[in-house]
Image: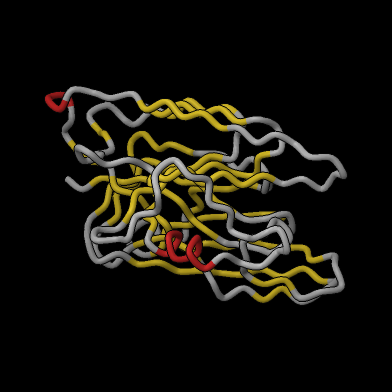
Amino acid sequence: HIETAMRPGTHHLILYDFAQNARLPQKDILRDIRDENGNLINSTLQSIADQIFMFGTQFRSTDYRYPSGVAQKIAAGKGLDLNSHYVNYGTEDIMGEVYVNLHTVDQSEVQYEAQNLFLNKLNINLPPKQETTLNSDYTFNDTRSVFMLTAHAHKHMTEFKIYIKGGARDGELVYYTNDWEHPEIKQYDPPIELNPGEGFRGEATYNNTTNETKRFGLLSTDEMMIIFGGYYQK
């Protein structure tokens, strides 16, 4: 299982693997997304493009356990990339700090290898001074047993719903949160069984109280609409 702990002020902590043949960043070096003038750093953006989601949380303390017989595989000699996002609207510096403990299990106890969902809607347009609801549909071409779902958005999100798309349970609400800062990491026992041609439909509502149009972006004042999850294949 995975244990995490973070100092106050955190927005999220995400553990990433890297795609095969990715150009790996230098080990044990902090990589800011922006320089001191607020400009994006291209080398950091390139490393983000090569990342593969493994686990994420928005809680200061998390003790996440995979279902019995299910485990996440990390190849020998490989490491993980830690992405921590802190929000500081104050006038004084704050200290950011995160810890991660990964607990292993003997291979003989593993029946299924965990896979991860990263379903990201990039086309976000939220007009100023109004409420907007966005939808995103995702269909899979294989069979999946989904054992975990969570959602990710920023401060203008007021509701985030996930429905099953297709099959006998089409339209069934399986996830809900109205807390953008601490969305539930919801586990399913038994898992949600999806057949080829089925998937998920996301529905998120935002209240943009500002005078500016909000779009997808990495800042907490931008917006996102992401479905994260875990599944295995029998």
Instruction: Please give the count of numbered marks on the rendered protein.
Output: 0
Give whichever of 50, 202 is nearer the camera: 50
- Looking at the image, which residue is at 76% across and 75% down? 213
Figure quadrant of residue 209:
bottom right
* Position above or below: 231 against 122: above
Q: In this view, does 116 lie above or below 61?
A: below
**Extreme left residue here?**
108
Vertical placement of residue 118 versus 106, above or below: below
Image quarter where the C terminus lies is top left
Answer left or right for 2 relative to 36.
left
Which percent across, then down, holds residue 176? 58, 48
Q: Residue at x 67, y 44 (%)?
A: 86
Q: In which quarter of the image is the N terminus?
A: top left
Give the image location of residue 196, x and y in percent.
Answer: 24, 63
Residue at figure coordinates x 67%, y 76% from the top left:
125
Q: Which colour scheme is used?
A: secondary structure
The x and y percentages for residue 215 are 67, 72
Up/down of 108 relative to 20, above or below: above
Front-lying residue, 204 or 125 = 125
- Indicate the quadrant where residue 131 lies: bottom right
Please state if 19 lies on the left or on the right of 131 as rendered.
Answer: left
Q: Name the residue at 35% across, 67% down.
A: 139
Relative to the observer, which residue lies in front, 17 or 164?
17
Residue toward you, 162 or 212: 212
